[in-house]
Amino acid sequence: MVPEHLLVKGVDVDSKTRCRHYHSEKDIIAIKFKCCDTYYPCHLCHEETAGHKPLRWSKDEWNAKAVLCGECRNELTIIQYMNCQSVCPSCKSSFNPGCQTHYHLYFEG
């Protein structure tokens, strides 16, 4: 059984955290939204299901565990995720490098 804090909410979420919006082989991360302390596969899932506006993680909070690898369920800090070159440091699975273009939606610069 997956611990409650590692459950991923969203739209059509599979066992590796892919969703209706992002479902390629490499779309295997989920982001914990600061506003609700809940993992979602993407900003669109949060928008469609959370019922509130998102809050972004401030730069001084980037040591928080807020990124989940959908392959091994390892939680990464934001800074670990940003520095991992789109590869999980735990299981070496590849993440979608295109996710970097969405950092501004989750993390303050």
Image (cartoon, rainbow, N blue to C red):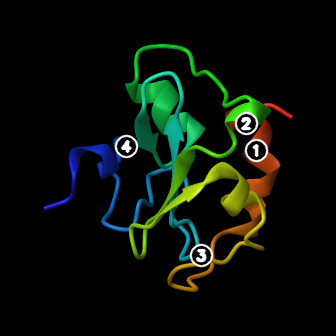
On the rendered image, what quadrant is the C terminus found in? top right
Q: Residue lying farthest bottom?
A: 92
SS for tag 4? loop
SS for tag 2? loop
| Up/down of 52 relative to 84, above or below | above
| Up/down of 62 relative to 83, above or below | above
Earlier residue among tags 4 and 2: 4
**Marks 4 & 1, CB-CB < 8 Å contact:** no
Instruction: Measure the C-alpha gap from mark 4 to mark 1.
Output: 20 Å
Instruction: Measure the C-alpha gap from mark 3 to mark 2.
Output: 19 Å
**Marks 4 & 3, CB-CB < 8 Å contact:** no
Q: Which of 73 and 51 is in front in this view?
A: 73
Earlier residue among tags 4 and 3: 4
- The percent coordinates of residue 70 (x first, y second) are 43, 67
Instruction: Measure the C-alpha gap from mark 2 to mark 1.
Output: 6 Å
Q: Residue at x 55, y 15 (%)?
A: 53
Tag in front: 2 or 1: 2
Judged left or right of residue 5, residue 57 is right
Q: Which of 103 and 44 is in front in this view?
A: 103
| Up/down of 6 relative to 104, above or below | below
Q: Name the residue under label 2.
A: 107
**Marks 2 & 1, CB-CB < 8 Å contact:** yes
